[in-house]
Each structure stands twice: as C-alpha cells, then as structure tokens.
Image: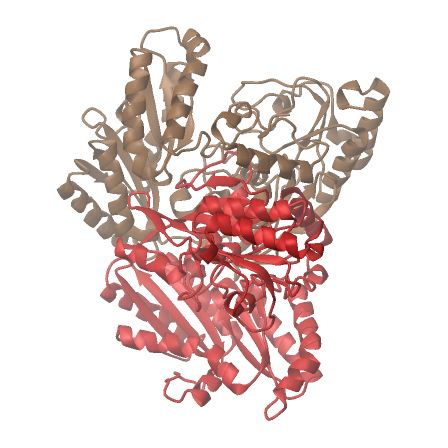
Chain colours: A brown, B red
C-alpha cells in the first residue's frame, strides 16, 4: 500500500503507534502546524500527516520503524531554516514530519580531545555557547544561528562566514549517530581525528539532506579561543583586485585569516539607502568593499600590527584604495552589521532572484564580468546584488528587477530565464549551482541539467541501496 | 563465467584486448612481476593474470570495461607502498593489476584558487615539488613520499606528520576524477571549496582502497609557504604530561602548530642503540620525548620567540622537564631524523608486532597505562615501541619480543593474542584499529569484530550498489 492510498483507519493506527512511542503530546496533527509545514522563505506550504517530536534516539528509531511499517515517508526537520524547501512536507498530507528539536542535549565536552558531542536538535547558538563556556571556539557561524540546529547544519553541510579558516559543517564533524532508513541506530560518534576502517559513512550522511537517514547526534571539533579578533574594511577597485587582496591576505595572515567577504557597490548602496543609521564605509566611491577578519593567538596589538602591514601592502599594490581597521568590538560589529544587512536591504528594495553559487576563485572576476554583461543585454536595467564569501569562491549573486519596475512581474516572468542564464555561466566557469544552501526540492529538478549523469547515477545507486523504498525525505536532492 | 574458470583462450583474448587498449608494451604477464605482485612489507606474494599500465583516463576506463566483460577482477595499484596488503593481487592468477603509474602528469596549478590538479600516478614528492616550484606548500608528507603516489594516498586516505594542522589526504582534496566499476568516467574534478549539490561522492571514493572505483586524478588544496619552520624537542615525564603540553601548544601556537610527535623512551633507546651516530636528546633521563614543529607566516625570529614562550610555560608547569629548539635547518633535520629512525631501529632490534591505532587524545594516557600493564602481565618481558602522532591521537603501538628471545617464534605464537589484547583495549577506549594505514586484506577479517554491524551493513550495501559484481579490489576492506 502506498502512502497516498492510506485509509483513514490506517492513518489513525499510525498516529496511535507514534503516540505510544513519543507520548500523545508529541504527535501533532491538527491545529496550526505552519511552524513545521511552511518553509523559511515561504516558498512552499505543505501538509503533514503528523508532526512527531521524539525525545531521544531510540524514539527516533522507533518512529522510523513505525513509518516504514505503515509505508509512510518521513521528512526530518531541525530548525526549519533551510533555504531550498528541504525540510517541510509536500502537499499530499501523507508525510510525517520528524522534528528533532527535542533532542537538544549537549552530551559532553572533552577538553583534552577538543571535541563536543551534541544532539541534532541543539540550536547552533547553544552549541557555540557551550563551547565558549568550556573555553573553546566552535566556529560554525551563519545568519540563522539563533534558530537553526546542528543536525540541520550537518544534513545541509552548512557554510557561513568562517569557512575560509575552519571549513564547512562537514569539516568540523568527527562522527555521527544516525538512524538509518530501516530504523537501525548507527553509533558512529567518534572523537577520532584519524580512522581508516572502511567507507566514509559520516561524510555520506553529511550533506544528504535527510534523504539517506536521520542524524541524531554528532561529535564536533573545538578550537582554541583566539586572543584577539580584528575586523577591517577595504575599498577595492575591482573584483580582480579583490582576488589579489585575498592572495595577499592569505600570505600575510596564513590561517589567522578567518573571514573575507566581498560586497558590490550596488549591494552596499541598498544598505545605505534603506538603513541610513548603518555606516557603510566608502560606499560612494568604491566599486567593491571587502570585509576582512583576522583571529590572533597572541594579542590585539600583534593582530593590529599584522593587519596594518597587510593593508599598507595592499594600498601600495593598488588592490585596495582605502581601508579602515575597527578600533573596538563595537566598531567591528558595525562593519559586520553592514555586511549582514544586505539581505534585508534587498528585501526592502523588492523581490529578487537569488543564487547561491560558487566558482573557482581565480575565475570569479571573469565570471562576474561576462555574466553581468549578458544579464544587462538580456534584461536592460537589471541590477546585481553581488556579495559573498570570496575566500570560498561563494557568491550570493542576486538579480534585482530594474528600478521602478514591477518586481512581482519580473520574478514571475524572468526567474526561469535568469536562472538558466546564470547557471549556464556557472557551468561554463566550472562552478556549482548550490554552494552552501543545498538542493532540497527547490533545485531538485534543476540539478540534472548541471550535474554529470555519471554522478547522478552514482547518487541514485546509493539512495537505492540505503533507502530502497524511498521513505526518507523523498523528492529532495534526487527527483522521484 | 567466474574469473577462476577462465579458459586459457579467454585469458589470451583478454590480454590481447588489453594490449590493443594500452599497447603491448604495457601489458605484462611473464618475467619478474614481483614489483607489482609483492606487497611493500613482504607479507604476501600474489600472482597476476596481467599487469596493465594504461597511459590516460580513457585507457583506464577501457581496461575496466575489458575486465568487466571478461568477468575478471581488478586490483588498482599506485606506488605499492601500502602497509595492509591492499594493492597486490591474490594468489589465484585471475586478477588484473591496474597500475596507475603512467598517469603521472601535473595537469595544472591555479595560483589564485590555490589548487593543483594532478594525475593519480604522480609520486607524492613530485606533487610537493610542483607545489613548491609555484610558491606553495602541499602539506601531505609521509615516510614513503619518494615512492607512493597521490592516487594511492587518496585511496587509502593517508595521514603522516602534518595532519594536526592540515588534515589527512581527504581534507586536502577538493575533487576527483574516477573510473567507476562499470568503466564510466566521473569527472568530479573541482576547484570548489563549497559545493552542496548532492551526495559526497568524493569522500566516498577517498579511503575506499580501490574497492568502489579507480581514482585517476584529483584537485588538491595548496597553502602559502610559511616564512619559517622551527622544530623543538621536549623531555616529558609522562603521557599525561604530553597531553598537557599538546593543549598548551595549541593555545600558544594555534594553527601554526604543525607537528606534535610523541616517542617513548624505549623506542628512542633503540635509535640510540642501533644508530649511535644519531643524537637523541634526553634519551637517558626522560620517559618520553616530544617533537614539536611550528610554521610561522612572519619570520624565524617571531617563531622562535613564540616557541620559547611556550617552552618556558611548559617548564614552569612541569609538563616538560627540558627542551631544545633547533638552531638551524640542519639541527631540525637531525631531530626529525631521530624520530623517523624509530621504524628502522625496531627492525634492527628484531621482528615486532605493529599496530596503527587511534584513541581520543584525552584517553591516551589511560589507554597506554592499562594496555601496557596487561601486556606485561600476559607476556612477561614484552617491550613496547610506542610512538606516534599524538596531536591526532594516533599511536604506532608496536610490541617487541622480550629481550634475547626468539623474535620469529614470538611473532608466530603471540601475534594473534597480542592483536586481540591491543584491539580489545582500543575498542574499550573508543578508538580505531586502523588510524591511517587502512584495512586492505590484512585487517579485512579482523574488522567485523571491531566495527558496528550497522556500519558494516551500510558499507556492504554501498559496495553492492556501486560494484555489484565485486570486480574492484575484491576481498579488501570487506571480506567476500
């Protein structure tokens, strides 16, 4: 029996079995379920057969087995902050949302091993705080950190602003606990930095967006807290110059370079326009701004002298035309605030077409120049909100409607055309159509046009092997 | 038809087809093939149906298809320096050795992207040299670097002495080109630091020891060359103190700490005994020696002042009782030479039972104490050659016969017993029975005793999905 043909009695029986596993209070199926059924960017509203909230790993496994027995598919969900419609149910009312939010414990911190073991539903900010309370840095950091969960971060292989130094969520994880599609528990929690005993199951589950199993806990790496963190902002004449400045910063600062964000003048001008209380350095005069962050193990004075040496060299080279170093933590926060306000500012300006792409860093200047020209030719007056993590080759290359035009009509009429143009350019330059946000259902239909058929064949074989009945988050990553 | 029942005519036909693909000069099947049939540590001598040496990726794919068509299995081989009998054929004479050595080109270096794309058969030292010639560091470094290949390093997820800072081979790789078990080419070469478009095929092939496909090329990360590298040696009173010193070094040096090797007094005494020309610091007085390496982006003077501050703090704390900092590159090499001579010195002392294990760093002192006591109780007079990469929790925990005993008899009679004792202890302390050497066929029968059945089930499902006829390096990692 397929899920769509479940009879009302079978639905009731499944809900009763789920209630017997997690308790009746944790099986929701009427009332307002929009917190679980509506995706973060409000692109899709689904309908769940039930929202189930298990309290521990054994309950997660039992929930999976109950759904498998009933022939019902599962949609694992953390903080539901994903940007690609990956953790909300479809509209059929036949899928169970498996919320991990009650698995929120920090199971332990091992100071000498510099690791932390945490359950999937723990909010990222709580993980950061637990690490800090033990005298360590947990470096994963992104806009949704107050709401997103570490399990969701791992399922999506989240990126953020510290990837340049510390890597993606994947790179911060040493081991996982996973409930398989058969409802078995794989205890792959590990505090080991080296373990060559077979296939890398950990990295297979990381980034698989809940389509192969459910991450219930993880052991994550911790780092020493830096003695000082400094922030600077450089005015940069071109994207080419930004790439030159990046290479210079890597040579000067080595691993102490923790952030390198590039922002186009139009993106910054929107912040200046819509949030006049935010000071945006050099916005009137400079084609690009670059935000640099440096973490130092020694002292603030040492960090400052290195930063100043770098910026002097950059000014002399010409890859920066002006620069400021934040004099205080408050000033540093102001600079970051300008960077982080771009998304809100473009929303204030109106609807736009968003892309989360990556290209080899060396090719970003040519990609931007050529793609910008093509867009301008195809859609006269189009405006580019171009910003991102240049140190990772990751741009949020967003396309805003021409000034004064009807933004809703623009989105309706141009989104497919703009996406195709941008993604074709990404392919031409050896890039990725999803750098850090994942595939979800938003890009599942697009992916086959840009991913190699051999890779897709391997992915389908793996999906078929680990989840042969396609019960885990079906239609995400791979289309049915 | 299975490989073992191939008729002579079918064997001739396969050899002829292989010769038509790669040229007759590159299909070897008589004469002395020991370079391909004998494993590095001379534990196993196999017999190949043929040794095939393709010259490019298309030829690798055609060789795989020819073998698949003939029902013959393949053993991919790089430098044949592996330590777990993973790249030599079995004794049946029915397997084709696929040597990657002729795929040795550096395809390109992208300076602004800080990446290098290289073919699988390139010798590690050549990769290091190509990086250095372009002004970069390629940090993977291990004893066999003059012979091993980058493809083998990736297939085995090699470790070495720089893992603490730069990670294993896995962590240095951005993308792969792979010939699948069906003889298709997956072009997953990528210079991207962020790409969330589906399952992590890259990390699945890395560390799979040629059992899922053949790695033919890779894009690897490069790093800035440090301005200065300094080496120090500390006398340390206990393993506990070594762990304390490690934490202190991480706080003082951050990411500039690139090496942290611990060596037990007995291991060092063997170097002192068999190679009297090598100066071994503090060997007479100290239970452990620790070799520290620090890479600095600024200057040698800066590195020296930081190293001195660390060592002063360590002496004050008592976790180090004495220390020297190398005054010159020659002195630094001497210190490394003492560390690297342990393997040869223990060979001079006689046969011994080797282990390549990892345990969470916090648990290493208790593991060593308890395991040492148990071994001493079970086998009076047994001697421990205990050394390794403490910064990664990785010990080469080798067991030497009692002094004056018959080492060959010791190995024959005690190896299984010693392995079981050590591996049971490893499991008890949450460790791995193969930290960096892999499984191969040497540990394939042991693995199921120490790996979770759920993990093994997932591994078998993946193997079955990607290589359903078990043609790729059969019997390695997973037993038939």
Residue at 37 percent of width and 84 percent of height:
B278
- Asked if residue A275 can be seen in this view, the reply is no
In the rendering, at what x and y percent does residue B448 appear? 71, 59
Q: In this view, does A253 lie to the left or right of B172?
A: left
Q: How many labels does the image show?
A: 0
Q: Which of B71 and B199 is in front in this view?
A: B71
Relative to A167, is B410 above or below?
below
A395 horizontally vs A235: left or right: right
Q: Relative to the observer, which residue lies in front, A42 or B259?
A: B259
- Residue A221 % position (x, y): 51, 52
Where is residue B431? Give x, y as percent.
62, 63
Residue located at (45% from left, 84% from top): B271
Q: In this view, does B174 lie to the left or right of A81?
A: left
Residue B355 image-quadrant placement: bottom right
- The answer to whether residue B325 is above or below residue B174 is below
Residue B129: name its quadrant: bottom left
Pinpoint residue A26: horizontal percent, then vertical percent: 74, 31
- The C terminus of chain B, quarter of image: bottom right
Q: In this view, does A313 lie above or below B344?
A: above
The answer to whether residue A324 is seen in the rendering is yes
For the point 58% across and 18% down, the residue is: A44
Image point (27%, 28%), residue name: A279
Residue most extreme to the front: B9
């Amino acid at each position: 029996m397929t899920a769509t043909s479940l009879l009302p009695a079978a639905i009731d029986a499944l809900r009763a079995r789920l209630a017997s596993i997690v308790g009746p209070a944790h099986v929701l199926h009427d009332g307002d379920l929009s917190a679980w059924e509506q995706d973060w960017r409000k692109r899709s509203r689904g309908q769940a057969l039930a929202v189930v909230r298990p309290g521990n790993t054994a309950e997660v496994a039992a929930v999976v087995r109950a759904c498998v027995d009933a022939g019902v598919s599962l949609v694992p969900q953390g903080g539901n902050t994903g940007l690609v419609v990956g953790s909300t149910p479809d509209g059929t009312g036949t899928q169970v949302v498996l919320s991990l939010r009650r698995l929120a414990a920090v199971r332990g911190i091992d100071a000498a091993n510099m690791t932390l073991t945490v359950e999937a539903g723990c909010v990222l900010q709580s993980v950061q705080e637990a690490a800090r309370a033990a005298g360590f840095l947990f470096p994963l950091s992104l806009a949704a950190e107050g709401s997103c969960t570490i399990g969701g971060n791992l399922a999506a292989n989240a990126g953020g602003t510290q990837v340049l130094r510390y890597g993606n969520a994947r790179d911060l994880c040493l081991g996982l606990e996973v409930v398989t599609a058969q409802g078995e528990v794989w205890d792959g929690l590990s505090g080991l930095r080296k373990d060559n005993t077979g296939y890398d199951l950990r990295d297979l589950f990381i980034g698989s967006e809940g389509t192969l199993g459910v991450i219930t806990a993880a052991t994550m790496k911790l780092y020493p807290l830096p003695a000082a963190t400094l922030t600077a902002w450089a005015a940069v004449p071109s994207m080419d110059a930004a790439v030159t400045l990046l290479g210079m910063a890597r040579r000067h600062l080595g691993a102490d370079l923790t952030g390198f964000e590039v922002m186009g003048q139009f993106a910054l001008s929107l912040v200046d326009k819509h949030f006049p209380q935010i000071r945006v350095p050099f916005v009137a005069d400079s084609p690009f701004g670059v935000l640099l962050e440096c973490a130092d193990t020694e002292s603030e004075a040492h960090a400052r002298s290195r930063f100043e040496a770098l910026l002097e060299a950059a000014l002399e080279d010409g890859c920066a035309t002006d620069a400021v170093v934040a004099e205080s933590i408050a000033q540093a926060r102001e600079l970051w605030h300008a960077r982080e306000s771009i998304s809100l500012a473009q929303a204030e300006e109106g609807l736009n077409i968003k892309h989360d792409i990556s290209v080899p860093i060396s090719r970003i200047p040519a990609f931007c120049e050529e793609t910008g020209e093509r867009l301008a030719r195809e859609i006269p007056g189009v405006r580019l909100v171009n910003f991102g993590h240049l140190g990772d080759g990751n741009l949020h290359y967003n396309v805003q409607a021409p000034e004064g035009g009807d933004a809703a009509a623009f989105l309706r009429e141009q989104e497919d055309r703009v996406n195709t143009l941008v993604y074709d350019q990404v392919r031409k330059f050896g890039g990725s159509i999803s750098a850090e946000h994942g595939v979800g259902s938003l890009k599942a239909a697009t992916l086959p046009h840009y991913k190699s058929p051999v890779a897709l064949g391997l992915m389908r074989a793996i999906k078929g092997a680990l989840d042969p009945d396609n019960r885990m988050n079906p239609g995400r990553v791979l289309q049915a």
